[in-house]
Amino acid sequence: MFLSETYRKIAADGIWNNNIVFGQNLALCPLLAVTGTATNGLGMGLATLVVIIASNGLISVTRHLIPSEIRIPIFVLLIAALVTLVDILMNAWAHELYKVLGLFIALIVTNCALLGRAEAFASKQPVRHALWDGLMMGLGFLIVLVALGAAREISASGTLFANASVLLGESFRFLEVTVIPNYKGFLLMALPPGGFIMLAFLIVGKRLIDQKIAERKARKVSVTVLTPVIAEEES
């Protein structure tokens, strides 16, 4: 096995079971605001991913040096410093995407998920676990951002990752796809209400999948329990 049970559990929690959006219902403001296209969702997701990994690692490294009485202000200060650094780098290297995302890059500081992981996990765990948790939580958030952006973009304009080469650089041109040629579009999906509607569909889909998984596990348990009983009766 490549990963121990601890790492597998952290990965499952971050990506699925305790997903920032589906499990914790956090970061809904940037989620709904920037996911008009999959490209915007990808950019915001990557920025948040970098910040949450760095903040988890930094807080874990310094956890024994931070007085418990003032830990929350210090966590916020560290996260704000990292967000400022990401904001400056995006302005320099991905300026077009920076203009599209605008204020929501700086508002990563107010993302309760980052402070929540710092308080609940990173401040109590070794660095390797904190970094892995940041990676998995960030990936889970990134996946939801891209999925919601992709669903809205396809519904609204029939394209996928439109203008990726403009916003993210020429190396991302391969992502640009016309999913439905000559599509007239569905304007509602490009507007804020479309974000709420599509997010509701995604949440319902996840819960249906969780229900199917739970039913399958229950059937396996019942079979495991009944098999020795049937064998005993037959003997």
Image: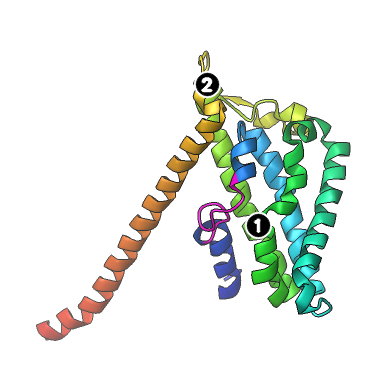
Give percent across and percent down for residue 144: 57, 46
Q: Residue at x 78, y 58 (%)?
A: 79
Q: Residue at x 68, y 53 (%)?
A: 111
Residue 35 is tagged as none
Secondary structure of the residue carrying tag 2 is helix
In the rendered view, tell whether residue 154 sits above or below residue 120.
above
Given the current orientation, which residue lies at the most extreme left position? 234
Amino acid on which disc 1 is placed:
Cys
Q: Quadrant of residue 176?
A: top right
Q: Is residue 125 left or right of residue 22?
A: right
Which segment is the magenta one?
18-28
Residue 112 is tagged as 1
Amino acid on which disc 2 is placed:
Leu
Q: Nearer the viewer, residue 101 or 73?
A: 73
Residue corresponding to mark 2: 187
Give percent across and percent down for residue 183: 51, 16
